[in-house]
Image: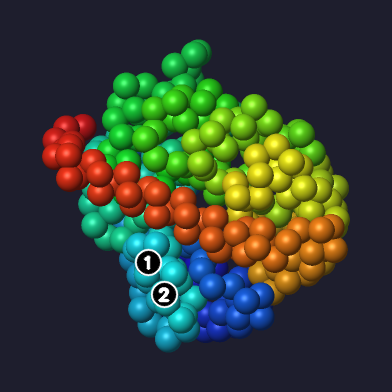
């Protein structure tokens, strides 16, 4: 929206946007009940104006979800479960957006943000990215600093989903050993099927399962078909593999539409999700398993994150640092 329309909602009809893979009409055609909207700003804004730019993206999402009757902003699992509209959940994609500030993290929570990816394609001073695109904060073996652990625990206290897609393997392992709540990989696939720095290896999948987390399978061709265009079958192979390793209860869908360009044949935009479900049904997945993949697994993780938050607050835990 920033790139194409400079965040000016008056210039676009969200019901039909031919330049994108996502609009309200196609979400309805794909039977989508909830959409995670990413408030993303580029890594080049780190230590400059990342906080302001992220606030502008959060503002955009809030306006989108308030101005269109088909959409409803939700900030709780109950709200997502109960709405009859397309639920809007706000995520921030990249820890550089909080500028190493716990008060900024808390204020984003107050604005309705319920998920934060600890990194994007750049390191922060406190966590490590899987990408080497940017030279920021190169580190040897300290993939999650003490302040990074404070971020994790404060997100636990607040009730925010910790997203490890884009984090390095070292950061992911460290977070899984620190977090008191389940975590998510919001848009990653199976490294065993397609080796890629953005995909999750089996040992991490097993650890994620032990901590009751969730991997939401990315549909981007580079991540599922290793540089080939691919098709629905290769995407289903990722689901089958993760099910074998971590169980169907650990899987969701994180399409990455409009976060990437180039998707498998038959999965060109968000209206195509039913074709993927039909493929999984043909492979013997049960309706109960697919109900989990489509909805219940994410809600379960969200609810458990909220339960950890409630427990921490009732125990009087409070984060007062002003980093």
Residue 119 in the image: above or below residue 272: above
- Residue 202: give x, y in percent of width and height: 68, 31
* Residue 264 in picture, x, y percent from top left: 80, 58
Left or right: where 143 falls relative to 151: right
Locate residue 21, reporting x and y percent. Answer: 66, 69
Q: Nearer the viewer, residue 245 or 233?
A: 245
Q: In the depicted view, which residue is nearer to us: 152 or 130?
A: 152
Q: Secondary structure at mark 1?
A: helix
> In the image, what residue occupies the spot 37% across and 21% down?
145
Crowding around mark 1 (Cα neighbors within 10 Å: few <14, some 14 to 19, many 20+) is few
Q: Which mark is residue 78?
A: 1
Residue 193: x, y in percent? Answer: 79, 39
At horizontal 65% and vertical 40% (from top left) the residue drawn is 246
Q: In this rendering, would 199 be left or right of 227?
A: left
Tags 2 and 1 in contact by the CB under 8 Å rule? yes
Q: Which residue is mark 2?
A: 82
For the image, the number of numbered tags is 2
Q: Is residue 144 visible?
A: yes
**Residue shown at 39% from the left, 33% from the top:** 179
Which element type, helix, strand or loop, lies under badge 2? helix
Residue drawn at the location 54% of the way across and 34% of the way down: 210
Residue 273 is left or right of residue 318, and the answer is right
State the quadrant of the C terminus: top left
Is residue 53 among what the camera can see?
A: no
Pointer 2: residues within 10 angstroms few (<14), some, or many (20+)?
A: few
The disc at residue 127 is none
Query: Marks 2/1: CA distance?
Result: 6 Å
Q: Which color scheme did the rendering employ for the protein?
A: rainbow
Say above or below: 10 vs 98: below
As drawn, the residue found furthest toward the top would be 140
Q: Is residue 290 left or right of residue 282?
A: left
Q: 46 or 231, which lies in front?
A: 231
């Amino acid at each position: 929206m920033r790139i194409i329309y400079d965040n000016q909602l008056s210039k676009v009809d969200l019901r039909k946007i031919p330049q994108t893979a996502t609009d309200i009409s196609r979400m309805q055609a794909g039977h989508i009940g909830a959409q995670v909207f990413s408030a993303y700003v580029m890594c080049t804004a780190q230590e400059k104006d990342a906080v302001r730019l992220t606030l502008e993206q959060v503002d955009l999402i809030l306006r989108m979800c308030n101005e269109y009757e088909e959409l409803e902003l939700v900030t709780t699992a109950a709200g997502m479960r109960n709405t009859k509209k397309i639920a809007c959940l706000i995520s921030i994609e990249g820890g550089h957006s909080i500028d190493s500030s716990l008060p900024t993290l808390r204020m984003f929570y107050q604005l309705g943000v319920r998920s934060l990816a600890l990194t994007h394609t750049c390191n922060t001073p406190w966590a490590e990215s899987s990408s080497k695109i940017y030279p920021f904060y190169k580190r040897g073996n300290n993939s999650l600093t003490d302040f990074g652990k404070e971020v994790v625990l404060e997100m636990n206290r607040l009730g925010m989903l910790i997203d490890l897609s884009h984090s390095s393997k070292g950061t992911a392992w460290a977070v899984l050993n620190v977090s008191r709540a389940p975590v998510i990989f919001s848009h990653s696939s199976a490294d065993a099927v397609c080796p890629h720095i953005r995909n999750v290896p089996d040992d991490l999948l097993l650890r994620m399962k032990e901590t009751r987390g969730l991997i939401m399978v990315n549909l981007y061709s580079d991540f599922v078909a290793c540089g080939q265009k691919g098709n629905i079958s290769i995407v289903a192979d990722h689901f089958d593999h993760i099910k074998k390793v971590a169980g169907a209860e650990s899987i969701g869908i994180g399409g990455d539409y409009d976060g990437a360009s180039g998707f498998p044949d038959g999965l060109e935009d968000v209206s195509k999700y039913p074709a993927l479900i039909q493929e999984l049904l043909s492979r013997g997945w049960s309706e109960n398993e697919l109900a989990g993949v489509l909805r219940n697994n994410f809600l379960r993780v969200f609810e458990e994150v909220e339960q950890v938050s409630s427990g921490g607050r009732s125990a009087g835990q409070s984060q007062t640092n002003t980093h």
